[in-house]
C-alpha cells in the first residue's frame, strides 16, 4: 500500500510539472529528458528563462532552460565548503580571498563545463565613529572544476541608511 501511495505522489509531482501553466512544453520535455524522475517543486520564470526547483534522487537542484527548451545550467548547493573537491579548496587557498569567510558554496553545471561558486565576505562589520555601520564586502568567486579562478564578482549589499 505504501508503495502505491509513493508511486501516486511521484506521478502527481511529475504531472504537476507537465501541467504547469505558462511553462512551454519544450521546457518540460527537456527537463524530463535530462532529469528523468525529477520531482518539480516549483517553477520560476525570469529573463526569458525557466528554472525548475526539483528533487532528483533525494538532492535539490535548480535546472534552468531557455524558452525553446535548451538547457542553460543546473545548480546545487554544497552543504559545507569543506566538502568541495580538493582542487577547489586548494585553488581557494591560493586566491587573494583565502582569509575571507566562505558562507555559501554551490556547484554549477553549464554546457561549457562544471564550476564551483563560493560566496565569501571579509567579516569586517564595524560601527564607525558616528555609529554608522561599515558593512562587510561580499564577493562571488567562480572556479572551473580544474581549479582555475574564472571570475570574481562584487555582490556586496549596502542597505539604505
Image (cartoon, rainbow, N blue to C red):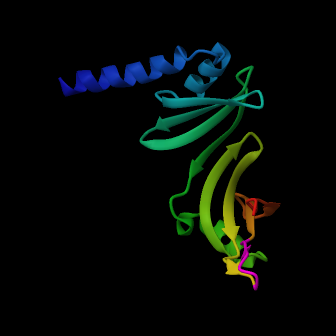
Please provide the residue range marked out in magenta. 129-136
Q: Nearer the viewer, residue 161 or 152?
A: 161
* Residue 71, magenta (yes or no): no
Q: How many marks?
A: 0
Q: Looking at the picture, does residue 104 appear above or below residue 48?
A: below
Residue 134: image quadrant is bottom right
In the displayed structure, does residue 6 sit left or right of residue 61?
left
Residue drawn at 71 percent across, 80 percent down: 131
Query: Does residue 99 appear anywhere in the picture?
Result: no
Residue 47: image quadrant is top right
Residue 50 x %, y %: 67, 28
Query: Does residue 66 appear anywhere in the picture?
Result: yes
Specify the farthest residue to the bottom. Answer: 129
Residue drawn at 62 percent across, 52 percent down: 107
Residue 119 x %, y %: 67, 62
Q: Looking at the picture, does residue 61 appear above or below residue 50?
A: below
In the displayed structure, does residue 150 sit left or right of residue 4?
right
Amino acid at each position: 500500500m505504501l508503495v502505491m501511495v509513493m508511486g501516486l505522489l511521484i506521478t502527481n509531482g511529475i504531472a504537476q510539472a507537465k501541467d504547469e501553466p505558462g511553462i512551454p512544453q519544450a521546457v518540460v520535455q527537456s527537463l524530463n529528458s535530462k532529469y528523468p524522475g525529477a520531482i518539480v517543486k516549483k517553477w520560476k520564470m525570469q529573463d526569458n528563462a525557466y528554472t525548475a526547483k526539483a528533487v532528483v534522487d533525494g538532492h535539490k537542484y535548480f535546472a534552468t532552460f531557455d524558452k525553446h527548451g535548451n538547457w542553460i545550467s543546473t545548480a546545487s548547493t554544497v552543504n559545507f565548503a569543506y566538502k568541495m573537491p580538493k582542487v577547489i579548496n586548494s585553488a581557494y587557498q591560493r586566491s587573494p580571498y583565502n582569509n575571507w569567510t566562505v558562507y555559501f558554496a554551490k556547484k554549477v553545471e553549464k554546457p561549457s563545463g562544471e564550476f564551483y561558486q563560493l560566496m565569501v565576505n571579509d567579516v569586517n562589520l564595524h560601527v564607525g565613529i558616528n555609529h554608522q555601520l561599515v558593512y562587510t564586502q561580499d564577493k562571488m568567486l567562480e572556479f572551473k572544476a580544474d581549479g582555475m579562478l574564472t571570475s570574481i564578482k562584487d555582490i556586496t549589499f549596502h542597505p539604505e541608511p
